Image (cartoon, rainbow, N blue to C red):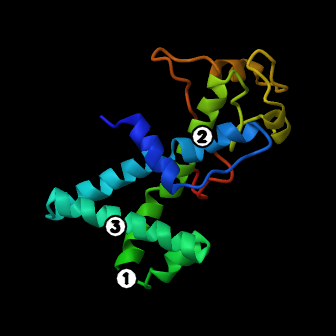
Amino acid sequence: IIDKNRFTKCIQHFLKSIFVDDESFIDMSTSISGSGPAYIFLLMEAMIDAGVHMGFSRDTATTLVHQTLLGSTLYAIETGEHPAILRNSVTSPAGTTASAIYELENGRFRTVIKDAIWACYRRSLEMGGHNSNIGPGRVATAQHLQQQQPFTTPLPTTASAAATAKSTPNADGHHPVEAPCGEMNDGNGK
């Protein structure tokens, strides 16, 4: 079990704090930064498990993954370059990295990450009693996001019954999350 105080002190030692004037950004930051370590730990776990599956010891695979993520992050911070430029700079045409990226893109890696972040953001809003019917494929507009209307305020939509159903938890206490559509559509209806 991780000591939460130790983890918080470690994170605060290495990370930069960002202050915002508008409290609506707090729920947004929760979805990226607050829950972000769990996303990274899951990525680390998957990479380590793949390394073990290929034949590395768990210790060796763990060291490789830790150093890869640390080095990549430090390099991104140091250069200030857009991640796409950095990724392209280490991806040779028809090379090993290009093959791996191809699989990640076919597996909808970007969409899964974006969907997870939107689901976290919506859940954070719900926990604060605010309208969570926002984001790709949702009916709420940016104006609703800025107003942070509580669930008790009817949404201005013809599908108000559907919106109410979406704000109602299911049997396990979680709110259903739909797959987003629109800007995240890969052109094949996925």
Camera-nearest label, 1 or 2: 2
Near mark 1 (Cα within 10 A), the count class, few <14, some 14-19 or many ≥20, is few
Which numbered dot is residue 95? 1
User: What secondary structure is marked by label 3?
Assistant: helix
In terms of image quadrants, where is residue 59? bottom left
User: What secondary structure is marked by label 2?
Assistant: helix
Figure check: 62 above or below 20: below
Figure check: 67 above or below 117: below
Name the residue tied to disc 3.
Answer: 67
Q: Is residue 81 left or right of residue 40?
A: right
Provide residue 47's location: percent of width, then percent of height. Answer: 31, 58
Kindly identify the residue that appears in the image at 36 percent across and 36 percent down: 3
Residue type at tag 3: Gln
Q: Is residue 40 left or right of residue 160?
A: left
> How many numbered dots are placed on residues in this image?
3
Name the residue tied to disc 2.
Answer: 30
The numbered mark, 3 or 2, whose residue comes first in the sequence reads 2
Near mark 2 (Cα within 10 A), the count class, few <14, some 14-19 or many ≥20, is some
Provide residue 161's location: percent of width, then percent of height. Answer: 72, 17
The residue closer to the viewer here, 148 or 14, is: 14
Provide residue 37's location: percent of width, then percent of height. Answer: 46, 47
Kindly identify the residue that appears in the image at 41 percent across and 65 percent down: 70
Q: Is residue 22 left or right of residue 164?
A: right
The residue closer to the viewer here, 53 or 189, is: 53
Camera-nearest label, 3 or 1: 3
Kindly identify the residue that appears in the image at 37 percent across and 48 percent down: 42
Quadrant of the image for the N terminus? Answer: top left
The numbered mark, 1 or 2, whose residue comes first in the sequence reads 2
Residue type at tag 2: Thr
In terms of image quadrants, where is residue 129? top right
State the CA–CA distance, disc 1 to disc 2: 36 Å
Provide residue 51's location: percent of width, then percent of height. Answer: 22, 62
